[in-house]
Amino acid sequence: MKTDKILVRKHGPIGHIVFNNPSKLNAISLEMWEGLGDAVAAFDADDEVRVMVVSGAGGKAFVAGADVSRYEEERMGDGAQEHYARTGERALRLLYDTPKATIAAIDGYCIGGGISVAVSCDLRLATPPSTFAQPAMRYGIGYRYKSLRRVSDLIGPAATKELLIGGKTFDAATACAKGLVGEVLPQEGFAAAIDQMAQKIAAGAPLTLKQVKHAIAQIVRDPADRELDEAEALFLACYASQDYREGIRAFAEKRKPVFVGR
């Protein structure tokens, strides 16, 4: 689905995905979940893109939860909630499973589904005014296993319960201390700092990125679901690659490597 609520742009090897519903603090709707999934899939298929940056428009919010005004239209009636849930899960799965690097650039409110999006990214950075909450009990909604698993893997079951059962709101410093975000950066120059990080990652070896992401994904999976043969194959592929030889030569020649993903 084409929607102006998800903005997509590309700057060299960096793909930007922007939640664009600022009048509602980027509260997310069904069409936005569809647009997010489509945007990630498109960047996945683009060999030039090596990093995706996910952010929110307006300077006040990343994603301030679901668009409650659309609940009756989108989440009630026969099969409506299941369709909504599957659409959201598709987007989050694509974001979590992409072999490319993903960065959540959080500036402002990160509520409910916003946290689900953020924890599906590899890296999460936030500005000092950012706040994090999961007010599920206020609306009687549920969270599926994978979404809660990703939060709990980062901050542990106790802190996850503080968010969902205790109804706590974490400020940026608390979220960082608990591991929900990796770093809190000044609001001034935040976009430039995110771009600098994305460019640094994009200059790295794509095969190594793919291998490391896959291996870490197996660590946090249930043991019965781990793809260890694939993890080993990706590990060996790094050392058989043109990029490995380029990296070693570049180090010896004291120059920056130029990686091609092969």
Image (cartoon, rainbow, N blue to C red):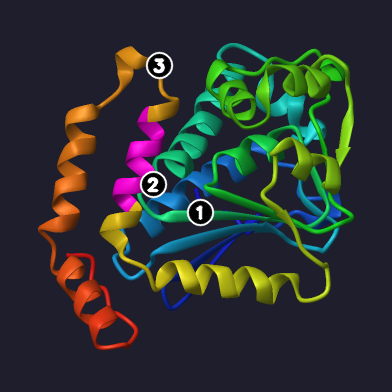
Q: How crowded is mark 1: few (under 14 residues within 10 Å), some or many (20 or more)?
A: many
Residue type indicated by callout 3 = Asp
Q: Quarter holding the C terminus?
A: bottom left
In the rendered structure, does residue 100 fall within the stretch colored magenta?
no
Q: How many labels does the image show?
A: 3
Residue 240: assigned label: none
Q: Which of marks 2 and 3 is in front?
A: 3
Q: On the image, which quarter does residue 250 sit in? A: bottom left
Residue type indicated by callout 2 = Thr
The front one of 4 and 101 is: 101
Q: Mark 3 points at which residue?
A: 222
Rounded to the nearest angstrom, the CA distance separating label 2 from label 1 is 8 Å
Main secondary structure found in the magenta portion: helix
Labels 2 & 3 near each other (Cβ < 8 A)? no
Labels 2 & 1 near each other (Cβ < 8 A)? yes
Q: Which x, y percent locates residue 68?
A: 81, 31
Query: Which one is earlier in the sequence, the residue at label 1 or at label 3?
Result: 1
Helix, strand or loop under label 2? loop
Q: Which x, y percent locates residue 200?
A: 48, 72
Q: Mark 1 points at which residue?
A: 102
Residue 98: assigned label: 2
Examine the rendered structure and indicate whether residue 14 appears above or below residue 140.
below
Rounded to the nearest angstrom, the CA distance separating label 2 from label 3 is 19 Å
The residue range painted magenta reads 210-218
Residue at image position (41%, 23%) is 221
The front one of 21 and 243 is: 243
